[in-house]
Image (tube, rainbow, N blue to C red):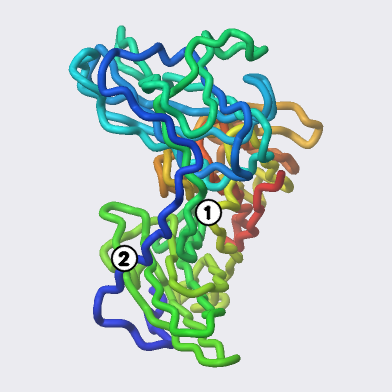
């Protein structure tokens, strides 16, 4: 087990997470407290969008069936078949009383997706998962809107089937958030071929003042631990946290995503490595490792994008694992296509991720495509729902457990 020593002092008191700077509404349409609304298969659009980015979009739904309802909201530029601006997925617990008033507002976060100000922006809702025989409705508002908003009969272009001149909604500008970073995966535990995986994290304070930093491990109860990094003038303080998983949660064994939140700008890197035992014949207590970079929330893949993982191998010398981490605040879904070097699709599999969740497929070329003699291949990772997915692969030497990181690229 690696040392848990810190090279900076720890903060004994709990540090509150920096609050988000409240975003201002850029489009408001008054919600109607009466009536059952219109079915979710109808769309709506803003013909002259008054901003250059979208933060949260708030809608209100009601259903004739109580229980969990999962909705996806897709924004497009121009028409319903125009370029995708973004897709957000959200879960709502609805009461099932259509005429008894609307359920709580549902907030879809687009994380500052870019919009051309003055363009038409269309929105289409999809019932991703609803109770059996459920009919779901949207609050279409009272007709009092801050800018023109139109509901249409459906979501087929062109935009010439106006139904009402309103939609109950609020669209916000992006929130100015604290400095938030994600390491896709950190580890403390055993793996294949007698490997023992550990992760160290280095954090550099880039700000002019003291950085109050919270590290959150996204497993179980999402435990946190805090540090403070001093700074003054051009001086910069770097913290090295050895075996960060055990440092945050000594009772946990395994891998998870690591979120780092600070009130100052940071530079972060993480090293994931196999730790050899002290009594092995060759290189006792040595390490074989790989670098994992840190990401801000806007750096993840969004719905509609496909990332490529290249240089993957599955044979007697190397094994390949493929990992996905959802650094967004809503659930995400992806389809992974495993390909040989000639471009033939060998197999596909789907991955669902809750917000903050990490999942790694162990040797999918072997377990899914049933191959053990692949000397070269790649994977395509297509995001089908959600925003903020990091895709990576780890190619590991069978003999030494020496890993190589492959980051998904558009």
Q: Do the residues bearing badges 2 and 1 touch, measured as CB atoms within 8 Å?
A: no
Image-based side of 173 in relation to 47, left or right: left
Q: Categorize mark 2 by other alpha carbons within 10 Å: few (<14), some (14-19), many (20+).
A: some
Locate the C terminus by quadrant. Answer: top right
Marker disc for residue 87: none
* Alpha carbons under labels 2 and 1: distance apart: 19 Å
Locate the N terminus by quadrant. Answer: bottom left
In this orientation, which residue lies closer to the viewer: 302 or 391?
A: 302
* Image coordinates for residue 47, horizontal then vertical, percent: 62, 26
* Image coordinates for residue 343, horizontal then vertical, percent: 78, 31
Dividing the picture into quarters, in which one does residue 315 lie?
Answer: top right
Q: Which residue: 56% across, 63% down?
A: 294
* Image coordinates for residue 223, horizontal then vertical, percent: 29, 61
Q: Categorize mark 1 by other alpha carbons within 10 Å: few (<14), some (14-19), many (20+).
A: many
* Image coordinates for residue 161, horizontal then vertical, percent: 58, 8
Mark 2 vs mark 1: give the one in front. 1
Q: Which residue: 61% across, 60% down?
A: 403
In this orientation, which residue lies closer to the viewer: 130 or 50?
A: 50
In this orientation, which residue lies closer to the viewer: 67 or 168?
A: 168
The answer to whether residue 328 is seen in the rendering is yes
**Where does label 1 land, which residue?**
297
Where 374 sits versus 161, above or below? Answer: below
**Where does label 2 land, which residue?**
224
Dividing the picture into quarters, in which one does residue 75 lie?
Answer: top right
Q: Earlier in the sequence, mark 2 or mark 1?
A: 2
In this orientation, which residue lies closer to the viewer: 82 or 250?
A: 82
Check disc 2 and report its element: helix, strand or loop: strand
Q: Which residue: 60% across, 65% down?
A: 290
The answer to whether residue 362 is seen in the rendering is no
Image-based side of 17 in relation to 384, left or right: left
């Amino acid at each position: 087990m690696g040392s848990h020593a810190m090279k900076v002092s720890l903060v004994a008191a709990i540090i509150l997470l920096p609050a988000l700077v409240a975003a201002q509404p850029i489009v408001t349409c008054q919600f109607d407290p009466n009536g059952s609304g219109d079915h979710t298969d109808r769309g709506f659009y803003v013909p002259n969008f008054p901003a250059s980015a979208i933060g949260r979009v708030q809608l209100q739904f009601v259903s004739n069936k109580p229980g969990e309802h999962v909705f996806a909201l897709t924004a497009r530029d121009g028409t319903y078949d125009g370029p995708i601006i973004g897709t957000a997925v959200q879960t709502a617990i609805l009461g099932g009383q259509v005429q008894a008033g609307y359920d709580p507002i549902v907030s879809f976060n687009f994380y500052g997706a870019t919009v051309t100000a003055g363009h038409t922006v269309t929105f289409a809702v999809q019932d991703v998962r609803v109770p059996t025989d459920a009919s779901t409705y949207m609050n279409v508002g009272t007709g009092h809107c801050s800018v023109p908003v139109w509901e249409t009969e459906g979501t087929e272009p062109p935009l010439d089937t106006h139904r009402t001149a309103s939609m109950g909604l609020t669209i916000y500008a992006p929130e100015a958030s604290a400095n938030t970073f994600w390491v896709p995966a950190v580890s403390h535990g055993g793996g294949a071929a007698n490997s023992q995986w550990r992760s160290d994290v280095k954090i550099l304070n880039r700000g002019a003042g003291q950085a109050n930093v919270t590290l959150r491990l996204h497993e179980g109860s999402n435990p946190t631990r805090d540090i403070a990094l001093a700074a003054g003038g051009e001086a910069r303080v770097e913290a090295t946290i050895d075996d960060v998983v055990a440092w945050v949660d000594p009772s946990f064994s395994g891998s998870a995503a690591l979120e780092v939140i600070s009130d100052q700008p940071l530079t972060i890197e993480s090293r994931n490595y196999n730790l050899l035992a002290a009594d092995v014949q060759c290189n006792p207590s040595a390490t074989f490792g790989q670098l994992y970079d840190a990401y801000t929330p806007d750096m993840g893949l969004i719905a509609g994008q496909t990332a490529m993982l290249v240089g993957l191998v599955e044979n007697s010398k190397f094994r390949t694992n493929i990992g996905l981490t959802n650094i967004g605040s809503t659930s995400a879904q992806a389809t992974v296509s495993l390909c040989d070097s000639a471009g033939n699709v060998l197999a596909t599999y789907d991955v669902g991720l809750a917000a903050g969740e990490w999942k790694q497929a162990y040797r999918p070329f072997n377990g899914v495509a049933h191959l053990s003699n692949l000397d070269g291949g790649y994977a395509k990772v297509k995001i089908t729902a959600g925003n903020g997915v990091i895709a990576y692969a780890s190619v590991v030497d069978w003999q030494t457990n020496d890993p190589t990181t492959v980051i998904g690229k558009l």
